[in-house]
Amino acid sequence: MATIYAKAFGKTILFGEHAVVYGQPAIAVPVNAVYAKATIEALPKTNSHDALIVLPNLGITRNLSDFADNDPIRTAISITRDYLSIKMLPAMMITIASNIPIAAGLGSSAAVAIATIKAVSQFLGFSLENKEINDLAFQVEIIQHGKPSGIDNSTITYNQPLYFVKDYSMELLVLKNPIKIVIADSGIRSLTKEVVAEVRALYQKEPDTTGMIFDQIGDISKKARAEIEKGHLKMIGNLMTLNHQLLVRLGVSCNALDNLVDVALGNGAYGAKLCGGGKGGIIIAVTPEIHIEKVISALITNRAANVFMTTIGSTRDKE
Ligand code: MEV
């Protein structure tokens, strides 16, 4: 049988993280500069029905049955097999490689799950619809993140900019023009599950103030949608910085992220904010074309672990 492979890109949240868990709208986009790739080869000479899993980034080669029951890769494979009503997997080797930094706000866990679900289903002879892939990936995200909104798996599955309201609607966002975004990684790793739980505890302790912050973030997402559709970079940037300030009030930023946001703003960015769970991971900045190089080199000088650029809203990437 031919080798099968499937790819899934990273994602970033332009507006609305955390508030999205409480029903506010959020805007997320795929990041095609990073991706996870699952490759499957048959092992015809093996009698075992246990898949061999190779994770080159982590230096791991192990049988699937040796992974913990709640391991995200094991979960992605078993829910796909169950969904397709396959009793026993054929002998196969699944290699999952990714250049998406883990726990950095770039959707690494969702991308790995989606690449795995796509490759396994194709290898078993099925061509799943995006909705089916998304539903399966959401189940993996629930095990991984506790109570996720579903924005990460949806953005990555559909591979399009999304205006997303949890349990309600998901609209493809059409950008007037492609937008260049500078992404700077603080190098600090932080688990989304833990930060989401901290925000939940804050909401329980101070429901009025926290609820008001969620509402304000939701208003920003609504305004940002209109500005993105019109292509008003400066307004998009202003709204990003406002969104960052509200995330600071939610307690999900940290000195390193605030510093990177200030460096981007001090070097000509229209706006900047942390992305994803926070307390580490990445910031993004929207910058006028003439200042992009300056912003990138200032972020590098000011201790960003990695800085790169991505263009959102261009033609869809091949999977
Ligand atoms: C994580 O990328 C985004 C959060 O809003 C959590 C979620 O939506 O599930 C922090």
Image (cartoon, rainbow, N blue to C red):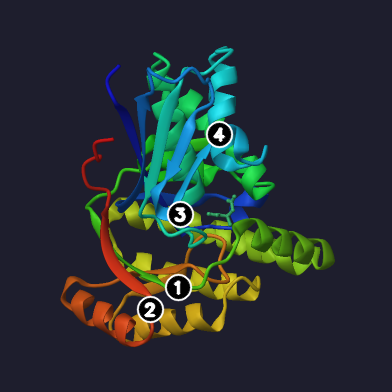
The quadrant of the picture occupied by the N terminus is top left
The kind of secondary structure element at disc 2 is loop
Left or right, 81 with reference to 298: right
Residue kind at label 3, given as amino acid type: Leu
The residue at 58%/70% (across/down) is 247
Residue kind at label 4, given as amino acid type: Leu
Give the label on residue 64, or none: 4
Left or right, 317 with reference to 56: left
The quadrant of the picture occupied by the C terminus is top left
Using the image as rendered, state which of residue 58 and residue 275 is in the foreground.
Answer: 58
Mark 2–mark 3 Cα distance, whole angstroms, equals: 23 Å
Mark 3–mark 1 Cα distance, whole angstroms, equals: 17 Å
Q: Which image quadrant for residue 82?
A: top right
Q: Tag 1: Cα neighbours inside 10 Å, few (<14), some, or many (≥20)?
A: some
Location of residue 303 in the rendering, given as x and y in whole percent from the top left corner: 38, 84
The kind of secondary structure element at disc 3 is helix
Which residue lies most toward the right here? 205
Using the image as rendered, state which of residue 264 and residue 98 is in the foreground.
Answer: 98
Residue kind at label 2, given as amino acid type: Ala
Give the label on residue 187, or none: 1
Q: Tag 4: Cα neighbours inside 10 Å, few (<14), some, or many (≥20)?
A: many
The vertical placement of 189 against 59, above or below, is below
Left or right, 278 with reference to 294: right
Q: Are marks 2 and 1 in contact (CB under 8 Å)?
A: yes
Mark 1–mark 4 Cα distance, whole angstroms, equals: 30 Å
The residue at 51%/48% (across/down) is 109
